[in-house]
Image (cartoon, helix red, strand yellow):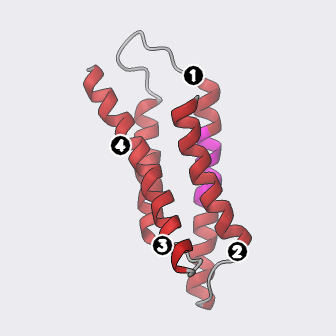
Amino acid sequence: MEVLRDVVVLLHIVGFAVTFGAWVAEAAAGRFRTTRVMDYGLLVSLLTGLALAAPWPAGIELNYPKIGIKLVILLILGGLLGMGSARQRRTGDPVPRPLFFAVGALAFAAAAIAVVW
């Protein structure tokens, strides 16, 4: 059971790595757009995060402040990605740079909290 939990933790980190990696690729190309890959990475992070928030195996101590902070970051990140995607579809223009850089900062912060805390 512990191996399964470790695999879910790994997938959780990979989800944020996909989101951040797609963001870095867009930033390096100078496009400043949100992509579906960022959305998929966020979805993987959400699903695996919800699985990790369940107390399995029995007896594991959950860090509720960490779970809450990461959930808030995930919700804000999802909102920013949604706003960016909607704006891109409506106007065809790249997202505003502050919004784009906020996506990268939040993706990095979520991964950092997962690893460091």
Q: Secondary structure at mark 3?
A: loop
Describe residue 74's horizontal placement relative to residue 43 as left or right: right
Q: How far separated are the C-alphas under marks 1 and 3?
A: 31 Å
The reply to whether discs 1 and 4 touch (Cβ–Cβ < 8 Å) is no
The reply to whether discs 3 and 4 touch (Cβ–Cβ < 8 Å) is no
Q: How far separated are the C-alphas under marks 1 and 4?
A: 19 Å
Q: How far separated are the C-alphas under marks 3 and 4?
A: 20 Å
Give the amino acid at mark 1. Answer: Asn
Chain-order first, disc 3 or disc 2: 3
Q: Main secondary structure of the magenta part?
A: helix
The location of residue 34, given as percent across then percent down, is 54, 72
Give the amino acid at mark 2. Answer: Arg
Chain-order first, disc 2 or disc 1: 1
The location of residue 56, given as percent across then percent down, is 37, 20
The residue at which mark 1 appears reads as: 63
**Image quarter (top left, top right, bottom left or bottom right) of the C terminus:** top right
Residue depth check, mark 3 versus mark 2: number of the one nearer the observer: 2
Task: State which quadrant residue 40 falls in.
Answer: bottom left
Chain-order first, disc 4 or disc 2: 4
Q: Is 25 in the magenta? A: no
Q: Which mark is residue 35?
A: 3
The residue at which mark 2 appears reads as: 97
Chain-order first, disc 1 or disc 3: 3
Identify which residue is drawn at 70% across, 74% down: 97
Give the amino acid at mark 3. Answer: Thr
Q: Is residue 102 above or below residue 110?
A: below
Q: Secondary structure at mark 1?
A: loop
